[in-house]
Amino acid sequence: MFSTASTTPEKLLQMLAALLLFAAVLGVILFLASRVRGKRSDNWVGYLYLLPVVLLLAVGLIYPGLRTIYESFFDAHGSSFIGIDNYKTLLTSSDQLTVLGNTIIWVLIVPPLATGIGLVYAILVDKSRFESFAKALIFLPTAISLVAASVIWKFVYEYRVDQPNVHQIGLINQIIVWLGGKPVQLLITDTFKLNTLLLIVVFIWIQAGFAMTILSAAIKAIPDEIVEAARLDGVSPWSMFFKITLPTVRPTVVVVLTTIAIGTLKVFDVVRTMTGGNFNTSVIANEFYSQLIRADNQGLAAALAVVLFILVLPIVFYNIRQVRREA
Amino acid sequence: MFGHSGSSRSRVALAGALGVGLVFGLAACGDSKDDSSGSTDTASAGIDCSVFSQFGDIKGKTISVYTGIVTPEDTPQKKSYEPFEKCTGATVKYEGDKSFETQILVRAKAGNPPDLAYVPQPGLLQQLVATGKAVEAPAEVGANVDKWFGKDWKTYGTVDGKFYAAPLGANVKSLVWYSPKQFKDKGYTVPTTLDDLKALSDKIAADGSKPWCAGIGSGDATGWPVTDWIEDFYLRLYGADAYDKWVKHETAFNNADDIAVWNAVGDYLKNDKYVNGGLGDVKSVASTTFQDAGLQILEGNCSLHRQASFYAANFPKGTEISETGDIYAFYLPGKDATTKPVLGGGEFVLAFADRPEVKAFQYFLSTDTWANLKAKASSGWVSANKGLKIENLTNPIDALSAKILQDPNAQFRFDGSDQMPAAVGSNAFWKQATAWITGQDTTTTVNNIEAAWPK
């Protein structure tokens, strides 16, 4: 049953078996739960329900996590212990420093800009006549897969030679030509990190819609009484934003910021699709993939995964603390 | 070049070549001079069955074949086995799998290997032999390979002095695409030495256009076409022995010869006077996909494009690919007209069983009989088998490839980056080559690649 299925009926059969197994496990747990009697039965039922989750997390997350940390101290094939050499490479090789630097640029720029754009947009279209249409416009990119978005933007940045019989097919370069300039190799130029910044634009384009949706809901949840009271006091639109709206939606802003920050740290699709990490644009997740799959360097890949984990961790803790404070 | 994507790319290309083959197949029949002499002995599917009697009665037996050759190229493969099946009464069970290269290792290690596997890289062949599950090729097959293939090919099927795998198909990378019509109009001639190639490039540049168009873009495999350039020039400038040492890392990647090779390639790829016809400056070599670059020849924006035989499939339908047509290729010349190093690839038939029927089939695949049967059944396919009759190849590029492979002076070498460890062959080599094109100097480039070599 667990051997490799090659034909469609075999695969369907395997899927059916997996579903049955799931149902059976669920049945056993529910049956056991119904049998629990006694004073503290509620507690026991709770633990029982937690059991599958804890088990699956242990098998699917905690064990692989610990294993990854362990392997990050080994060489390319996981055969000999090399101490912290992989981490040394990450912090000394110029390639890897570029990767770390780029990741930092990403995480410093994307969350504030995406959240900021989402927030401003949400306030601007709030209660306007075309609100739902305007929201749909900015939310649409969120619905596209990251790879598809990257392909679209690759065309936007496309370069064609500056030659009489050749036409630009990239939007940006066509605009540059219309304005009398010469087309630029946008995705290759890394002066002032231009290409990295252009990749960041794509990610912001996608994330702003997400930020806008969540923040718009938070703005709508501001009690009318507060808004009306402020209006009666005659506040200016500026003080309305800074003294009423922003403080009220602050917890939501924090959640959105941190969620986007975690997503940004893990960004992979955009970089891989648009530049493949070439031209000094690689980021940690992309480098992790390259080292594991292409370079066959398991140890360095594990070290990159651990670094990514360490970077994400404080944001997750901060997020949890915020949620707790509100509860 | 590189492992997985490499062979899948050539597969895609071959698939296309089948289509293109239909288009120019007619044209080729038209101007083939030795059409009449071609199909006498091998035209009838009947082959000499008596050769298989040495393997005893294998009627009703089954031979399982596992390979990365999938639709549509699997059809001519299976078709070419039919005469064998008729002769012997044995059945060939063919299994094509796109993820062959990873799965075969798993299957070999798990003790569930096929009878025969078509292995596309010498490196993978060595890994498979190292599992201890593979068996040496029978003496009859060794004799066939001695008879029909060059020594260089036998070497790639040999591990630790023992001969395991006979070559199957082959492809040629040392090709330069050009337009015969344009050459005729402008009075250019096909170069026969490296100096000629340089002189031709200078002449075209002097006539006011960029001679070369190049593109190394290939998603996250960007950079691999440069590796083929470097390998081709290494073979030409320093010979096959030095090349072998460099591939095996017996000489450092940043040795003096290597730096000279990169600079020689740089004289073409990083030369503003030579590149990049219709595509931009030197940097556009990095941003143009390898599929797109050569098409500029059709636009008249450039004259020369170095790429493997599979590139034929990239030209749009209706393009006449022939010695006098819109597009054709010439052999990337050696240092002088007599030395002919050939860079390329191919598959090798590795056995995991030594039953008589498996031996018989291995024997069949290593004969000139099979090579000719296969040639007739397909387009976009060629073998290094010297018994392959060129007139049986309907596709002009196949015929050219076969001629290059069969040249008595030809010295075949397998793609080097395919044999280097993954950290170099499919990572650092590509990445550093790309950085080199966009401005990094040669010394830094080769030093970085040397540093990436697993210790």
Image (cartoon, coloured by chain):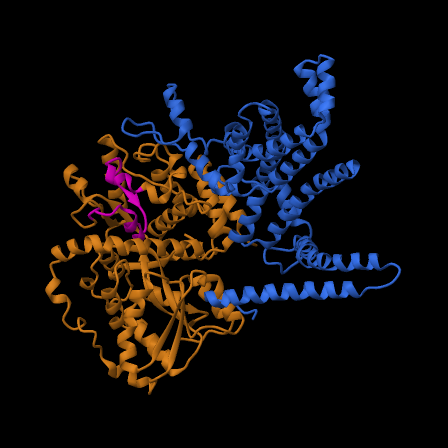
Chain colours: A blue, B orange
Q: Which residues are magenta?
A: B294-320
> Which percent across, then down, holds residue B191?
22, 45
Asked whether residue A148 appears in the rendered view, the answer is yes
Q: Quadrant of residue B80?
A: bottom left
B119 up-or-down from B278: above or below = below
Q: Check the picture and name the quadrant holding the N terminus of chain A.
A: bottom right
In the foreground, A1 or A15: A15
Asked whether residue A276 appears in the rendered view, the answer is no
Q: Is residue B232 left or right of residue B30?
A: right
Q: Which residue is painted at 32% across and 58% down in the image?
A: B171
Q: Is residue A97 left or right of residue B186?
A: right
In the foreground, B71 or B115: B71
Asked whether residue A190 is drawn in magenta, I would say no
B173 up-or-down from B151: above or below = above
Q: Quadrant of residue B47?
A: bottom left
B84 up-or-down from B9: above or below = below
Q: Which residue is painted at 16% across and 37% down in the image?
A: B186
> Which percent across, then down, holds residue A158?
40, 33
> Which percent across, then down, holds residue A80?
64, 59
In the foreground, B289 or B386: B289
Q: Which residue is painted at 18% across and 73% down in the image?
A: B44
Q: Quadrant of residue B201?
A: top left
Q: Is residue A264 left or right of residue B8?
A: right
Q: Which residue is painted at 58% across and 67% down in the image?
A: A17
> Which percent across, then down, holds residue A232?
73, 14
Q: Check the picture and name the quadrant holding the C terminus of chain A.
A: top right
Number of callouts: 0
Asked whether residue B295 is drawn in magenta, I would say yes
